[in-house]
């Protein structure tokens, strides 16, 4: 199984959900710049942000973190 990085998983899930960077940022409660940094691998979200990402995208933390496939 190929190991995928958080940044790639996040972008793929966001696009599958039909969300722009701005829309995801608004739903998670962060700035669009923050989401851009996550997707470029420059920063990582904290626990609460990961939790919100999971809720917004309707997936488990294991999926977002690359521990299991979706």
Image (tube, rainbow, N blue to C red):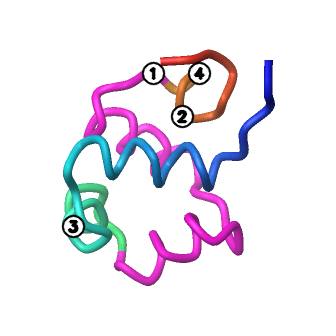
Left or right of residue 54, residue 19 in this image: left
Q: Position of residue 16 (x, y in %)?
A: 30, 42
On residue 45, the disc is none
- Looking at marks 3 and 2 on the same chain, the residue that comes earlier in the sequence is marked by 3
User: Left or right of 61: which side holds 17?
Assistant: left
Q: Secondary structure at mark 1?
A: loop
Q: Which residue is mark 2?
A: 64
Earlier-in-chain disc, 1 versus 3: 3
Q: Are marks 1 and 3 in contact (CB under 8 Å)?
A: no
Q: Nearer the viewer, residue 59 or 46?
A: 59
Marks 2 and 1: in contact by CB < 8 Å?
A: yes
Q: Position of residue 49 (x, y in %)?
A: 46, 51
Percent across and percent down for residue 15 are 32, 51
How many marks on residues?
Answer: 4
Distance of label 3 from label 4 (alpha carbons): 23 Å
Answer whether labels 2 and 4 touch (C-beta < 8 Å): yes
- Which residue: 72% across, 38% down? 4
Percent position of residue 22, x then y: 25, 74
Residue toward you, 7 or 28 = 7
Quadrant where the N terminus lies? top right
Look at the magenta stretch and give its main secondary structure: helix
Disc 1, disc 4: CB below 8 Å? yes
**Quarter of the rendering containing residue 38:** bottom right
Q: Residue at x 30, y 37 (%)?
A: 57
Image height of 28 relative to 40, above or below? above
Q: Which residue is mark 4?
A: 62
The verdict on residue 61 being magenta is: no
Q: Is residue 39 magenta?
A: yes
Q: Residue at x 54, y 25 (%)?
A: 63
Query: Bounds of the magenta span?
Result: 31-60
Could you tell me which residue is drawn at 54 percent across and 34 percent down?
64
Q: Give the Cα distance between marks 2 and 4.
A: 6 Å
């Amino acid at each position: 199984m190929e190991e995928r990085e958080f940044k790639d998983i996040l972008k793929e899930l966001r696009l599958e959900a039909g969300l722009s960077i701005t829309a995801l940022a608004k739903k998670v409660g962060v700035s669009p710049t923050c989401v851009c940094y996550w997707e470029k691998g420059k920063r990582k979200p904290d626990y609460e942000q990961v939790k919100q990402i999971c809720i917004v995208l309707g997936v488990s933390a294991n999926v977002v973190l690359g521990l299991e496939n979706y």
